[in-house]
Image (cartoon, rainbow, N blue to C red):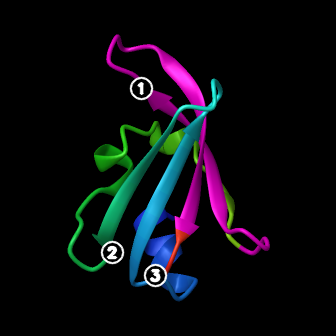
Amino acid sequence: MKLKERLIVEGFDVVDILVIDEENNNTTISDVSLTKVNDLEYKLYLQPESVEYKLNEEYPHFIAKQEDDEGELKDVKGYILEW
């Protein structure tokens, strides 16, 4: 199941996603309307086959490989923030 569908099944609708890489650099993607976005993995530069879900944790998140500007893969955690 893709990230978008998995988040919708878990009851999320509009979220912010805090992405933290292995060097503790972070980026927040705000106001992601899951019903309007087509391919969330593509939007976040994630390798779809690498996404591991931790959505039932106290702080729901996913772990994945993300492609950086040079095309290198790095490990990231994406925390789901819902307001």
Q: Marks 1/2: CA distance? A: 22 Å
Q: How crowded is mark 3: few (under 14 residues within 10 Å), some or many (20 or more)?
A: few
Whether residue 54 appears in magenta in the rendering, the answer is: no
Q: How crowded is mark 1: few (under 14 residues within 10 Å), some or many (20 or more)?
A: some
Magenta stretch, residue numbers: 56-80
Q: Marks 3/1: CA distance? A: 24 Å
- Please, what secondary structure does the residue beneath circle 2 have? loop
Residue 64 seen anywhere in this rendered image of the structure: yes
Q: Looking at the picture, does residue 7 appear above or below residue 53?
A: below
* Disc 3 target residue: 8
* Disc 2 target residue: 34
Give the camera-side residue of 48 and 55: 55
Q: Residue drawn at (65%, 27%), measured in percent from left and top? A: 22
- Please, what secondary structure does the residue beneath circle 3 have? helix
Amino acid type at circle 3 is: Ile
Give the camera-side residue of 82 and 42: 82
Q: Marks 3/2: CA distance? A: 7 Å
Q: Residues within 10 Å of mark 2 (few under 14, many from 20)?
A: some
